[in-house]
Image (cartoon, rainbow, N blue to C red):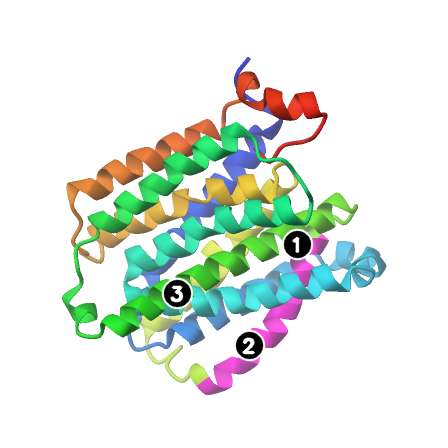
Amino acid sequence: MFWKNETTTGVIAISLASFLWGTTGTAASFTPNVSPLATGAFAMGIAGLLLLFCARIALLEEINKLAARPKLLFSGALSIAIYPLAFYTSMNWAGVAIGTVVSLATAPFFSILLERLINKRPISLQWIISFGFGAIGVLLLTLGKQPDMALETDITLQYSGIILGGVAGLTYATYSWAARQMIDSGISSESSMAGMFGIAALILLPTLFFTGDDLFASTTNTVVVLYMAVIPMFTGYLLFSYGLQHLEASRATLITLLEPVVATFLAVIIVKEAFSAVGWFGMLFIAICLMLQTLKLPVISKACQREGKECAS
């Protein structure tokens, strides 16, 4: 059998989370008068409080385990706090498609780097091939995005948005890796994510006093920010935490390359961002990348098996 049955639910959960996250850029485009910093802080902050509330019983039972791993807990929490600020600002400055693509495309690379450097985990050929298809797909997606004339007037701002996308990718990889390390140490996925998100909420929500003036200025703004907090963020991260129980962080972040596909598709259809045929070929390559992550290919992993080690696949 080539289908890896024991991880199927994890792949499905993270794929669903990625689909929900892919809607955030388009949703945010309906609130142009709201600061991207406020959008990110509110959505992630409220989602953190909801996760904290839902996991309150497990969190109380495992509070000592979390306290015993302060570096993981606080590095993950700080990464969660930085991620939405970098991600939404990147989309605002570089465009919905490019901001999402850069943010999500760099996350798998940073994830595998963390696992290799810190956990000393070998990298399987399957992961490398999958990442290759994904990277090519992301490149084609980026090339397929037609120049945005509004952004061309300030090329420095656009490049700054791309850099912030890289920061978002690094922080995304860091908190995913930290969550997986806590799960591997015996802490439940609910407590791991709730602990990090709860601390991040304490960091993010106070910033709304300076950035959140227009959050509820209209019905559209209110609906959008509440949607983003409850559906993509809260529900999405519940699914993501479940998926991390079954998959390594490097594999989980690789599967989330589905998010830029969804984001790009919605940006073209709803936001009316221009897109060429090259970009659609990029989506095909990303689809192949995701397909490879649902298959168990014994030949590809033989090198790791000979070494008696677990590969990041």
Residue 257 vertical position relative to residue 5 in the rendered view, above or below: below
Instruction: Find the distance from the CA under tag 2 to the CA under tag 1.
Output: 22 Å
User: Viewed as shown, does residue 260 lie left or right of 235?
Assistant: left
Residue position for label 2: 205
Residue 5, image x, y percentages: 59, 23
Residue 249, image quadrant: top right
Hey, what amino acid is under mark 1? Ala
Hey, what amino acid is under mark 2? Leu
Residue 201, image quadrant: bottom right
Quadrant of image for the C terminus: top right
Instruction: Find the distance from the CA under tag 1 to the CA under tag 3.
Output: 23 Å
Q: Can residue 223 be seen in this snapshot? A: no
Which range of residues does the magenta coloring cover?
Answer: 191-210
Q: Earlier in the sequence, mark 2 or mark 1?
A: 1
Q: Which dot marks residue 163?
A: 3
Badge 3 crowding class, 10 Å Cα cut-off, few under 14, some 14 to 19, many 20 or more, is some
User: Viewed as shown, does residue 26 lie left or right of 290?
Assistant: left
Q: Residue at x 30, y 69 (%)?
A: 93
Residue position for label 1: 178
Q: Residue at x 47, y 40 (%)?
A: 255
Quadrant of image for the N terminus: top right
Q: Secondary structure at mark 1?
A: helix
Residue contact at pointers 2 and 3, CB within 8 angstroms: no
Instruction: Find the distance from the CA under tag 2 to the CA under tag 3.
Output: 24 Å
Nearest to viewer (mark 1 / mark 3): 3
Badge 1 crowding class, 10 Å Cα cut-off, few under 14, some 14 to 19, many 20 or more, is many
Q: Earlier in the sequence, mark 2 or mark 3?
A: 3
Q: Secondary structure at mark 3?
A: helix
Nearest to viewer (mark 2 / mark 1): 1
